[in-house]
């Protein structure tokens, strides 16, 4: 691992998630016992500094979502939510979290949130939820619920997220 570090240390943040995606097929070929150790090591490394940043959170979600079903035998959940109104609170949590991670300026956060939520429900208005409702724990719970949404609802949420992220014309990678 130490020998590889110099060659991967310079990988920019814009390439990290695509590299994880490219590694998924190889990771699926592990033995179940290897996966258990791999998963435990990833979780340990992510939480080693007692803080989880957005990339670490994304890495955990990608790995668990894509590999746990393979190695743990989880079946895909059936669709439970077919309307954006059924997952409004969860969608708002995702958009608020993105808005807060995208800017430290409260006005910019509120503007990004408003633009994103307007994609979900045109004409909607409302204040951005409090910061404590925009934590990674809240995001995790919201994403778990949104996994049970229909493809059309998910598409709308992704579009709202993209609008939120692009609202200020500047996309941050970390």
Image (cartoon, rainbow, N blue to C red):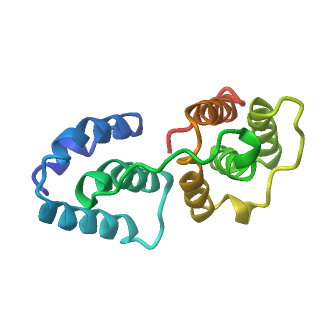
Q: Is residue 24 left or right of residue 33?
A: right
24 or 15: nearer the eye? 24
Q: Which corner quadrant of the image does residue 159 belong to?
A: top right
The quadrant of the picture occupied by the N terminus is bottom left
Q: Is residue 155 above or below residue 43?
A: above
- At 73% from the left and 47% from the top, the residue drawn is 86
| Residue 122 spot, x, y in % from top left | 84, 29
Q: Is residue 141 above or below residue 58?
A: below
Q: Is residue 53 left or right of residue 73?
A: right
80 or 59: nearer the eye? 80
Q: Which corner quadrant of the image does residue 56 belong to?
A: bottom left
Q: Is residue 147 left or right of residue 59?
A: right
Q: Is residue 113 above or below residue 136?
A: above
| Residue 155 spot, x, y in % from top left | 59, 30
| Residue 53 spot, x, y in % from top left | 49, 57
Q: Is residue 135 left or right of residue 73?
A: right
- At 81% from the left and 38% from the top, the residue drawn is 114
**Count of picture labels:** 0
- At 74% from the left and 61% from the top, the residue drawn is 131
106 or 31: nearer the eye? 31
Which residue appears farthest toward the top when viewing the image? 169
| Residue 149 spot, x, y in % from top left | 59, 43
């Amino acid at each position: 691992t130490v020998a590889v570090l110099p060659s991967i240390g310079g990988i920019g943040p814009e390439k990290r998630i695509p590299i994880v995606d490219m590694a998924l097929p190889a990771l699926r070929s592990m033995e179940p016992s290897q996966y258990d150790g791999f998963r435990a090591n990833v979780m340990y490394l992510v939480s080693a500094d007692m803080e989880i940043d957005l990339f670490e959170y994304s890495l955990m979600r990608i790995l668990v979502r894509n590999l746990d079903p393979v190695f743990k035998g989880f079946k895909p959940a059936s669709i439970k939510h077919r309307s954006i109104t059924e997952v409004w609170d969860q969608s708002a949590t995702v958009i608020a979290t993105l808005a807060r991670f995208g800017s430290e300026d409260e006005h910019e956060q509120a503007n990004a949130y408003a633009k994103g939520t307007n994609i979900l429900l045109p004409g909607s208005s409302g204040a951005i939820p409090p910061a404590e409702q925009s934590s990674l724990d809240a995001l995790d719970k919201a994403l778990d619920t949104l996994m049970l949404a229909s493809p059309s609802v998910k598409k709308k949420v992704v579009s709202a997220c993209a609008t939120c992220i692009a609202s200020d014309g500047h996309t941050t990678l970390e």
